[in-house]
Image: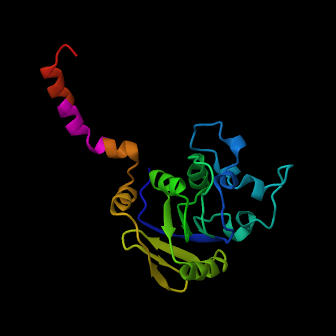
């Protein structure tokens, strides 16, 4: 998993509330267990017509936001079914941070496990960030995980809270496997000792 330290990038405004996981990655794309390749189907039914043509009005199809790395969203982002493909699709597209007033619990947890930082902010702050995101590609937002701040293109800075353990994992690029591998020497020592004490096992 890639480390998340400081991210400066384009923020896409998505003021819709209750963006659910089926909107993020529709069910027909859940057949794969590969984490790569899902970005092209991110928000598929919102991005494309039934014949596969792009819908020009959708924010990620607009030239200013094709390379967005941050989404500023409405309330209750990631609700619906508990599909891990949703953060996979966001990450494969290039999204590393989502900012909202609230998230569905399972989606929120899945983000951290896949290298995406979900940030909960008060409504008034989200409105400021949404307005900044609407300025387009020239307005770069900065998310500093170490300092726990989000800074707008004109220098307004807002603090956010994040669980210390999850922060540690993101800063060091540790998913569940990485956390286990941190204990590799202790695991090896245990296995060697166990084998000596229980040679029949």
Image height of 135 relative to 19, above or below: below
In depth, the one of 185 and 138 nearer the eye is: 185
Task: Name which quarter of the figure residue 144 lies in.
Answer: bottom left
Location of residue 50 in the rendering, given as x and y in whole percent from the top left corner: 85, 50
Residue at image location 64% in from the left, 51% down from the top: 39
Residue at the extreme left of the image, as rendered: 197
Number of numbered discs present? 0
In depth, the one of 5 and 122 nearer the eye is: 122
Q: Which residues are magenta?
A: 181-190
Task: Name which quarter of the figure residue 198 lies in.
Answer: top left
Location of residue 67 in the rendering, given as x and y in whole percent from the top left corner: 63, 64
Residue at the extreme top of the image, as rendered: 200
Location of residue 18 in the rendering, given as x and y in whole percent from the top left corner: 66, 63
Q: Is residue 40 magenta?
A: no
Location of residue 102 in the rendering, given as x and y in whole percent from the top left corner: 55, 67
Task: Say which quadrant the C terminus sits in.
Answer: top left
Task: Name which quarter of the figure residue 181 lies in.
Answer: top left
Residue at image location 56% in from the left, 43% down from the top: 35
Residue at image location 60% in from the left, 64% down from the top: 76
């Amino acid at each position: 998993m890639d480390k998340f330290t400081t991210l400066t990038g384009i923020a896409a405004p998505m003021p819709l509330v209750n963006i659910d996981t089926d909107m993020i990655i529709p069910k027909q794309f859940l057949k794969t267990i590969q984490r790569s390749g899902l970005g092209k189907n991110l928000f598929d039914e919102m991005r494309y017509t039934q014949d596969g043509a792009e819908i020009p009005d959708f924010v990620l199809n607009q030239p200013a936001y094709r390379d967005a790395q941050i989404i500023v969203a409405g309330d209750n982002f990631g609700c619906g079914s508990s599909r891990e493909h949703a953060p996979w699709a966001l990450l494969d597209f290039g999204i590393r941070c989502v900012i909202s007033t609230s998230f569905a619990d399972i989606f929120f947890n899945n983000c951290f496990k896949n290298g995406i930082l979900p940030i909960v902010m008060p409504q008034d702050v989200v409105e400021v960030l949404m307005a900044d995101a609407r300025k387009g590609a020239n307005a770069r937002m900065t998310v500093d995980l170490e300092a726990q701040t989000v800074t707008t293109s004109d220098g307004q800075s807002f603090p956010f809270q994040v669980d210390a353990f999850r922060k540690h994992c993101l800063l060091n690029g540790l998913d569940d496997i990485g956390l286990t591998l941190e204990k590799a020497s202790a695991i090896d020592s245990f296995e060697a000792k166990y084998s000596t004490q229980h040679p029949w096992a």
